[in-house]
Every structure is written in C-alpha cells, then in structure tokens.
C-alpha cells in the first residue's frame, strides 16, 4: 500500500476505505501509534479534522496561527468562560503548536494510578523502553542554560535567590533557532513535531492520512466497532461539507485528544456504556507578570526552558502546583490581562519589559479538585463544566504569592496579577495584597494548555472507560490512545507521556487486529 497525506477537500465523491486500523486524530498519541502500526505492516488510515500545514504556512503571526492551528480558532473555553482553553487542531495536533517542554511521567503519579485507579503495568520499568524510543526519535534533550531567554532567566534567578529548586527542562528540538515562535508553528522545522517525525514515518510505511476530515461517529453494536463515519470539512469555516468518508476497519483507535475523544464517544452513544466525559483535567493555569527595568523581550527565545516543581506535592490536604515561564506574545498577553482601558494600554505599553510566570495546578489528585465534565449541547457543541473549587482557589492564592516573590527576588520593579482589577506588589512587605485578593472563576485569568482525562483508564468499568491496555471496557476493538485516557493530571507537561503512551499502545492494538 502506498502511503499519502490527502485533504478530504479533494474527495469529489463519497468514499469508502477498508483497513486494519483507523486512527482518529494525528497528535501526540495518534501519530506515534499510527507509525508503529504501519511499521508492523498493518494497513492504517488516519483521519485528522485539522489541515495539513508545514513551515511555509507558519508566518509567525498570532492572528494567522490561532485561527488556523487551534481548536475553535483559539477561543475554546469552559462553559462559564472562566477558563480559556488552548488546544491544537492541525496535522500533528497539539504538537504543531506546543512549546516543546518534555518530561517523563513522574513515578508518584504512576503509583497513584496503580493504587487508586487499579491501573496495571504502568510503572517506570515498563515505560522505560518507550520513553527511550520517543526521546531518540524526537531528539528530546536538555536545553542549554547558555541559551535560556530572559523570561525563563528571571524564573531561574528569582527561584535560586529564594533557595527554591528551579531546573532546566528538556525539549523536543533539533536545529532550534531559539526564535520563540513555537506556539505559531516552527518556521524552521526545529521543533520535532508529529508532522515532521512520526507522521512521515507512518506514510513511508504505507499509512493513508486524510486531513480536513472529521470523524463524526464510531458505529458499534456495544461489543464491536464496525465503522467510522467521517465528513470532509470546508476550507473557510471548517464546517462539514457532508461529503462522506466511511471507514471499515478491523480496529478503531481514538486519538482525537481530551475533550474531543469524549465528544466523539458521546456522539457515538458510547456514554451509555461508561463515564465518558467525566474526570476531565486541565492543569488550570494562573499567571503573574513581573515588570522589570531591563528589556525582557519575552517573545524571543525558547518559550520554556526552566521549571520549578518545588510546590508540586504540598501533601494530601492541598492541591500542588508547578511553575514555568510562558511566552509573552502581544495577542496572548492582551487576552490574558484582566484589566481594561488605560490599565490595559499601560500593561501592553511595557510588554517588552515584562516577564511572565505561570502556576499550573495539579487537578485529579485531591478530592476537592476532581476535574470537570464534558457533555454535549442540543446543537452538538461541547459543554465543559469545570468547577473552580475551594482547594483549587487555595492553590491559586499560594501560587500567586510564590510567583510574585520569585519576580521580586529576580529584580522586578513590581509583580502584577491578572485579576480583573490587577493587584500590584512592589516589595515583600506588600505581598499581603495578593493574599487578600479574591481568587476563582471570573476573578482573574485562568487558562489550560494541558487537557487530560474524560475517557480515563482504570480497572473498574463504573469509574473508567478503558482498561490498562487502553482498550474500551466493552467494545473489544476500540482503543483510546491520547490524553483523555490519563486517570489524573500529571504534575508535568503531558506530551512526552502521550508519545510514550502511543508507543506502548502499538503492540496492544496490533494484537487486536
Ligand atoms: C499552546 C500549547 C502549548 C503547549 N505546550 C506544551 C509543552 O510545552 N509541553 C507539553 O508536554 N505539552 C504542551 N502542550 C500540550 C500538548 O501539546 C498536548 O497535551 C498533546 O498534544 C495532546 O496530545 P493528544 O494525542 O491527546 O491530542 P492532540 O495532540 O490534541 O491531537 C488530537 C488531534 O485530533 C484531531 N481531532 C479532534 N477531533 C477529531 C475528530 N472528530 N476527527 C478527526 N480528528 C479529530 C485534532 O484536530 C488534533 O489534531 C501544549 C499545548 C498547547 C495548545
Ligand atoms: S524556539 Fe526553536 S522550536 Fe520553537 S519555533 Fe523557534 S526555532 Fe522552532
């Protein structure tokens, strides 16, 4: 079989495909599992709702990128609009626009999956060969301290001044020009995203990839999946053309990502069989900006190169959080800033001297941070309810305090929160202002770039959708190979876990063909 990447828009008639495996989605999980299956000689068809893009399309403009490469043109949000959700949507999924930070799954999280969720066979030793394989293919390596940009440099300097652990992190890059534009698609092919690595591997081994094609339903009889009904999408608004691509596979793999796999399963009436959409985790992010005398230029340089996990485990009574820097591109910054009018003009006017830290709360571990729930509205749209609970609010307050201290220790003139009425702190003596501020939904900016859960893995079909081998509890030839299978949030950026998950799933899926 000759592999290809073809747009569904080129289909001039309804089309049917037979294959061994249909993979829905071409992101971190889908690309890796598709490449592995094709390498074993299996006949693989991948459908991807987003468009095929490459370096020629990446013009380093936020206005182009968010509309073209992100879910809902970059405007996806929780149902109450309290949480902005950044999620990728193109060939390569989130990996095309992500910031390249790579971590292995922490041992304490794997142990939690075992002891609380009954997940078997996901320990460090079992995962080792899979991490090694993806690290080699994606050139995952520590970013040299000499190349750290001023934004991440402030996190390093301030953290170390406070005696807080801050470590360099690893990135999936080769020939990175340190431009800072990862979030808009890498213009020099330095980022080793899926459209440059595992997807070409899959095509070379014979996989057929259809872009601009959305899987609408997985047809099944409650025990076996029989078909994947897809539609081609139009060019301008990404709406269905009703041109049909019907796939008749032996095995179906959903790799549409968190939020999207649950939506596909709800459309397919798989939610009657298990808790689809429940326990959706976001690593909800809060932000504190630091205003410095010197130029920071936070849009230049690798977006993330330093992280602090000093507060990731705050004991069983409290939600943990970890700290990273975030790129300071103008549209993203303007959207995140909580104030209006002259306040926003003043904030944007000093953007070149602004460093930005993010605090990512680890949901899904504490009983009062159970995550959110995906359901479907009558008109077909996604509805994500995500309660910002007292335990999360406590973590947001604590994270604000720590981030402000780090900015001040790094030499910032002031630390500024992203509250609707921003809180400004110019010295340690003023930190009480942040403590006294209100936290929670609609009080300040909250984001997510790490969606997880919603079709979680576990031993009990009452509380999980797939087994430890990622196979659906009831539908024997249906697998979930993406972020939605994770039983909790990770406390680290998720992409490397999902590459390894895709690699690990190959033998399980192949055995089901
Ligand atoms: C701006 C940004 C920065 C990030 N930075 C980092 C980082 O530095 N490090 C890190 O570890 N993580 C980062 N992430 C998160 C990381 O990229 C994701 O966790 C990861 O890509 C998720 O992988 P996945 O396989 O679950 O799904 P995705 O990679 O999201 O892929 C799912 C694909 O399925 C497609 N799809 C959805 N529904 C359908 C359907 N019905 N039919 C056909 N196709 C469908 C989507 O278009 C998408 O392309 C970032 C994310 C964003 C948005
Ligand atoms: S920082 Fe490196 S990987 Fe990211 S867009 Fe620039 S060149 Fe590409």
Image: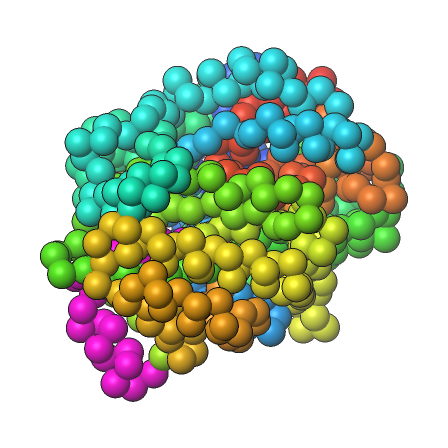
Residue at x 62%, y 29% (from the top left corner)? 108
Q: How many marks?
A: 0
Q: Position of residue 208 (x, y in %)?
A: 50, 33
Residue at x 60%, y 26% (from the top left corner)? 107
Residue 326 appears in view: no
Q: Relative to 234, is 513 above or below?
A: above
**315 or 98, which is in the foreground?**
315
Magenta region: 340-358
Q: Is residue 75 left or right of residue 156?
A: right
Q: Position of residue 56 (x, y in %)?
A: 22, 46
| Image quadrant assignment for residue 267 | bottom right
Q: Magenta stretch: residue 351 in it?
A: yes
Residue at x 46%, y 31% (from the top left corner)? 103
**100 or 426, which is in the foreground?**
426
- Furthest residue to the left? 294
Q: Position of residue 496 (x, y in %)?
A: 48, 31
Residue at x 69%, y 43% (from the top left corner)? 316
Q: Magenta stretch: residue 53 in it?
A: no
Main SS, magenta residues: helix
**435 or 353, which is in the foreground?**
435
Q: Relative to 380, is 163 above or below?
A: above
- Furthest residue to the bottom? 341
Instruction: Give the quadrant of the C terminus.
Output: top right
Q: Position of residue 219 (x, y in %)?
A: 76, 46
**334 or 426, which is in the foreground?**
426
Residue 387 appears in view: yes
What coloring was used for the rendering? Answer: rainbow
């Amino acid at each position: 079989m000759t592999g290809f990447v073809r747009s569904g828009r080129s289909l001039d008639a309804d089309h049917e495909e037979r294959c061994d495996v249909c993979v829905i989605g071409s992101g971190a999980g889908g690309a890796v599992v598709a490449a592995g299956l094709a390498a074993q000689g299996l006949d693989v068809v991948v459908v991807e709702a987003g468009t095929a893009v490459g370096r020629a399309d990446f013009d380093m403009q936020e206005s182009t990128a968010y509309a073209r490469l992100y879910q809902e043109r970059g405007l996806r949000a929780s149902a109450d609009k309290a949480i902005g959700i950044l999620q990728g949507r193109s060939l390569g999924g989130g990996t095309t626009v992500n910031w390249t930070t790579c971590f292995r799954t922490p041992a304490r999280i794997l142990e939690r999956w075992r002891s609380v969720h009954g997940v078997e066979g996901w320990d460090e030793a079992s995962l080792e060969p899979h991490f090694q394989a993806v690290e080699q293919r994606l050139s995952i390596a520590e970013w040299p301290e000499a190349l750290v940009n001023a934004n991440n440099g402030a996190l390093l300097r301030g953290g170390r001044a406070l005696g807080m652990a801050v470590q360099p992190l690893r990135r999936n890059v080769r020939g990175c020009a340190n431009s800072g534009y990862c979030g808009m698609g890498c213009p020099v092919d330095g980022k080793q995203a899926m459209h440059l690595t595992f997807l070409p591997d899959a095509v070379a081994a014979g996989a057929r990839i259809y872009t601009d094609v959305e899987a609408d339903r997985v047809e099944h009889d409650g025990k076996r999946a029989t078909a994947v009904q897809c539609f081609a999408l139009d060019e301008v608004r990404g709406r269905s053309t009703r041109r049909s691509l019907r796939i008749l596979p032996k095995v179906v793999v959903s790799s549409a990502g968190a939020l999207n796999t649950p939506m596909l399963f709800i459309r397919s009436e798989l939610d009657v069989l298990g808790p689809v959409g429940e326990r959706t985790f976001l690593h909800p992010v809060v932000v504190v900006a630091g205003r410095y005398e010197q130029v920071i230029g936070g849009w230049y340089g690798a977006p993330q190169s330093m992280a602090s996990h000093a507060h990731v485990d705050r004991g069983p009574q409290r939600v943990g959080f970890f700290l990273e820097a975030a790129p300071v591109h103008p549209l993203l910054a303007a959207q995140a800033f909580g104030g209006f009018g002259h306040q926003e003009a003043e904030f944007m006017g000093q953007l070149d001297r602004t460093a930005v830290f993010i605090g990512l709360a680890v949901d899904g571990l504490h009983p009062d941070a159970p995550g959110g729930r995906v359901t479907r509205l009558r008109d077909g749209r996604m509805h994500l309810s995500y309660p910002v609970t007292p335990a999360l609010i406590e973590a947001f307050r604590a994270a604000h305090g720590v981030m402000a201290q780090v900015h001040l220790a790094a030499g910032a003139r002031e630390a500024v929160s992203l509250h609707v009425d921003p809180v400004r702190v110019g010295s340690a003596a003023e930190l009480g202002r942040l403590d006294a501020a209100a936290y929670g939904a609609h009080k300040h900016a909250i984001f997510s770039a790490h969606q997880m859960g919603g079709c979680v893995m576990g031993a009990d079909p009452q509380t999980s959708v797939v087994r430890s081998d990622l196979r659906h509890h009831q539908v024997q030839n249906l697998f979930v190979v993406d972020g939605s299978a994770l039983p909790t949030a990770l406390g680290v950026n998720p992409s490397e876990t999902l590459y390894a998950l895709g690699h690990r799933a190959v033998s399980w899926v192949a055995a089901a063909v």
